[in-house]
Image (tube, rainbow, N blue to C red):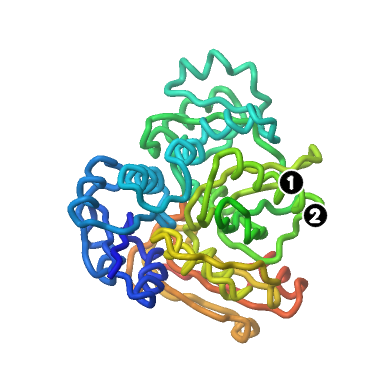
Amino acid sequence: MKKLMILGGSRYILPIIKSAHLLGVHVISADYLPDNLGHKYSDEYCNVSIVDKEAVLNAAQKIKIDGIMSFACDPGVVTAAYVAEKMALPSCGPYESVCTLQNKGKFRKFMKEHKFNVPMAGCYRNMDEAKKEIELFHWPVIVKPADSAGSKGVTKVDKLVDLEKSINSALFFSHSQEFVIEDFLEKIGHSSDSDCFSVNGKLKIISFNSQRFDKYAQNPYTPAAYSWPASMASEHKNELSREIQRLLGLLNMQTSIYNIETRECVDGKAYIMECSPRGGGNRLAECLRYATGVDMIEASVKAALGLPVELDQKPYSGYWAEVILHSNEEGIFDSLWIAEEIHKNIVEKDIWVTKGDIIHEFSGANEAIGTLIMKYESGDQLNEVMNNISKYIQVRVK
């Protein structure tokens, strides 16, 4: 029986565990939080910090694993690549390439050197370093941790006087104690944050969506919903597909799922904002499996174990949406109200809290309380609901 180590133990690894078990694989879940939900479903638990590369390597060697992966868990991606390289296990790509993709500062520098569309950006460790280059930026700017996901610590800054506060917030969420400042890119319509897949370096599955935000949330840059197909112009989808393939080739990436954020902007250009060799943290691969029948979850398990992977692009079977359930105020969860007229469109309802639980303001993806997956027969129907979400869906608190 093959042994697969999964770094992280959140609920987002449950589909991976299920797929692995269907393939007859023994699953070891690993992190330093033994009460995480995922560990209840794995075959074995390993208590180790997933950002400690040497500790994970030592544990993996003792267990004699056949594969390692970090799915929907950003902190473990670099460690998984490190262990795979040291143990000569199947890997998404070279360790150094993964480090480039996972650090926003390194990624921006790499993109600039290879003449991709990229905003003015710099990576720093403190305010004094940033001040030396502050004249290079065009305000407003975005400040973000160099190595964090889920929109944690990300803020838009309009004035220099507010910069230090945003830097401190970014550093709080950064494992490397680095932050990135970059020009704020004014997008057209919706940005895209969807999952893709390459096999032996060739992009086999490319997807774009419409990433939607809640302007009333504590952190308005945390994705609050997604819909497929994307609103992005066809010419920009085609351009981005070519550029993503060029990026993967330059980095010698191999067989992997990727969470890729892109956008088209008012300057007429399309940008690759992020490209992480992991599944997205908001059940994106599951949504795409519903919408297209393509199973990138099973493919990710096979890739981590070096098993053959066969995938083909397929069209969307209708119009799909995922709503990230959340509250814009802290309180006691009472109920989820859903308008009667959209009940027929709900494919799956997954609520992670129960009545009486304390829930918090939506400051990051970690404050989500569940998801709704919906299907519509027309884009107009979907957009009516998504553009007026509080009319149809309400998280009620006391």
**What residue did someone put label 1 on?**
264
Q: Earlier in the sequence, mark 2 or mark 1?
A: 2
Res. 159 image quadrant:
top right
Front in this rendered view, residue 22 or 177? 22
Is 72 situated left or right of 270 in this image? left
Q: Which residue is located at x 41 percent, y 47 percent?
A: 77
Q: Secondary structure at mark 2?
A: loop
Q: Residues within 10 Å of mark 2 (few under 14, many from 20)?
A: few
Residue 262 visible from this viewpoint? yes
Q: Residues within 10 Å of mark 1 (few under 14, many from 20)?
A: many
Image height of 171 relative to 150, above or below: above
Q: Which mark is residue 382?
A: none
Front in this rendered view, residue 151 or 397? 151
Image location of residue 62, percent across then percent down: 18, 52
- CB atoms at circles 2 and 1 under 8 Å apart? yes
> How far, Cα to Cα, is label 2 from label 1?
8 Å
Q: Which residue is located at x 68 percent, y 25 percent?
A: 138
Q: Which mark is residue 233?
A: 2
Amino acid on which the number 1 mark rests in the picture? Glu
